[in-house]
Amino acid sequence: MTTQAIPQAGSAPRKGYRRGGKLAGRSLAYLILTIGLPLTLLPFLMMILTSFKTNTEALRVPPTFWPQHFTVENYLKILNNPKLPLLRFYANSTFVAVFNVSTTLFTSALVGYLLAKFEFPLKRILFGWYLLSMMIPFQITMIPSYLILAKLGLINSLWGLVVFSAVNAFGIFMMRQFCETLPGELLDAGRIDGASEWQIFFRIVLPQLKPALATLGILVFMSNWNAYLWPMIVLQKIEVRTLPVILTWFNSTYTGQPALIMAATVLIVTPILLVFVNFQRWIVQGFTFSGFK
Amino acid sequence: MNTRHQKPDKRPKGGLAIAKGRFVASILMPLLLYQSVGIFILAWVFALMFFDYSPGRLGGPILGLGGSNPFVGLKHFVEMFTGTSASAALFRTSLKNTLIFAFLVLPLNLLITLPLAYLLEAIGERLKVIYRTIYFLPVLTSSVGVALIWMSMYDPQAGWINTILRAVGLRPVAWLSDPRAGFLGVPVAMWAVVIAYLWQDYGYNMVIFIAALQNVPHELREAALIDGATPFQAFLRVVLPLIQPTFLFVCVMTMLSSFQVFDIIQVMTNGGPGYKTQVLMLDIYRNAFRYQNMGWAAAESFILVLLVMGITLIQMRILRTRWEY
């Protein structure tokens, strides 16, 4: 909501500067930026290299850079560990993320459309409530939410991670913003052709919102996939946990085996990272839209 | 809830208005029902902080409040700021550490992101995408993963950071476990989590700065340079004022998220050594879910929310002034 005005206007005046012949300045920029790269990449590289070392080598002082005895033993150990059914944890995380993305996209589009295109008595109150709930951080609702889940018997259930996530105030505001740009004639044309209001929503409004929904979807997916605190509170049994929670459990169970822990980190962190990198453009778009993380 | 009856409209309603009204009502009914749970949760937490509540005790008939979970009024808040009990002292430590963390993160973050974004904005389009992708990688990484990677970097024996320190002739440091070692009056463990946090977070502010910088016409900067300003002066006097709204916005967002820091610290130090990195979220989590001391934790989270809300209101102020100009 804050910076989205910026990219639209910013395309024109770039070329002239580049012709300016400031070769020195630009090489300096490249130089400094390139120095920054290893600082960003080195920790990732360490993680990957350590995961291919034997455990004794990983504990050696001073540490080796390249693995001297390149081994995939750590990976095999994790993948063959019956106490660590990785596929199940992947399934848990996927279930929560996909479910929450679906409900959030649906409710955001619907309520956003409602707030943008309809007049009804409670509109202002509803609007104010969503504005307020964007300001209320999750921490304050955490305790009663937990108590409710406990009453409902949803502790240790993946459903506990989805019941309070069906409506997202940020998503509603984002969709409302996009719905306001929809021409009223388009909707009225549908009405004249005899479409019901629901048909108009599904056939006309939703297709128009596709790019915005993609941005919102990837953001919600990412925040769910990486969520840690709330899943840790709700999921106390090992077999129902999501990936970040299982990763810390693994870390505290196998202390003193850094190579093994790094292999687990690679297996849990990197696959989705590749997906996120591919969606990077949309994630950046969403971030610059309003600072949602 | 049904719009048809409440709207003071004199004309007879057509089928379209009825259909629209039905549509709105069919969404509003379930929606309001769902949102009322949210209001109920807020009311509950607001009540909780005035009670000495623990879910283990069987309290009064309404939400277990009262009875063996007695009403204590403002006692929690008085205790937090003036009390001598261990949990009150720990709350104040947590509050102090949270502020230290946030006020370390903010300037360091700006010091890294603003110049890098500025440089990145000036280079060619294709390389820009590659650089940005790499700088953005940690933002996309799960914070638990970030914490584990940095824990191995900080390992006192085999970790790379100490290896580098030894190589340049400095004394190795037990980064995450030495409660006495400090730098500039801040414990090394705090620096360690701040650095890990910065590493994960800086790409985020960078993309926001890049978006803002793209909007600054390069002619303005050129004009300043022609008038004899140094590139640094041109940046300070011309570019920075033009992106000021974004700058303030980034400050606020960075503050907000660092007040609420939890994941990285919980995994890396769990508040240690000797509560040197105990921050508010960690204290709230512990009191609520480990010690079942939920009334106290609710009161603590209220203080955190006051901090966060205060900053959010400042942010909205800033945004309003921005819209005006």
Image: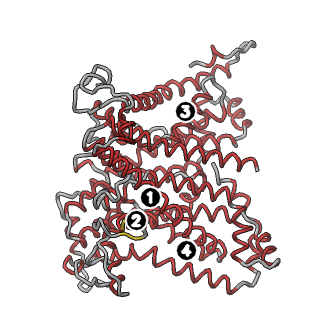
Q: CA distance from mark 3 to mark 4?
A: 41 Å
Is disc 3 in the same subunit as disc 1? Answer: no
Q: Dividing the picture into quarters, in which one does residue B128 lie?
A: bottom right
Question: Chain ID for label 3?
Answer: A
SS at mark 3? helix
For residue B100, the mark is 1
Lower sequence index among marks 1 and 2: 1
- Of labels 3 and 1, the one closer to you: 1
Q: Residue at x 61, y 33 (%)?
A: A114
Q: Position of residue B62 (x, y in %)?
A: 32, 21
Is disc 2 in the same subunit as disc 3? Answer: no
Is disc 2 in the same subunit as disc 4? Answer: yes
Q: CA distance from mark 1 to mark 2?
A: 8 Å
Q: Residue at x 57, y 57 (%)?
A: B251
Question: Chain ID for label 4?
Answer: B
SS at mark 1? helix
Q: Is residue B237 left or right of residue A28?
A: right
Which residue is tagged 3? A129
Q: Callout 2, which amino acid?
A: Val
Q: Callout 3, which amino acid?
A: Trp
Which residue is tagged 2? B186
Q: Is residue B289 left or right of residue A188?
A: left
- Of labels 4 and 1, the one closer to you: 1
Comparing B251 with A90, the one in front is B251
Q: Is residue A118 above or below residue A39?
A: above
Q: Callout 4, which amino acid?
A: Tyr
Q: Position of residue B151 (x, y in %)?
A: 32, 68
Q: Which colour scheme appears in the figure?
A: secondary structure
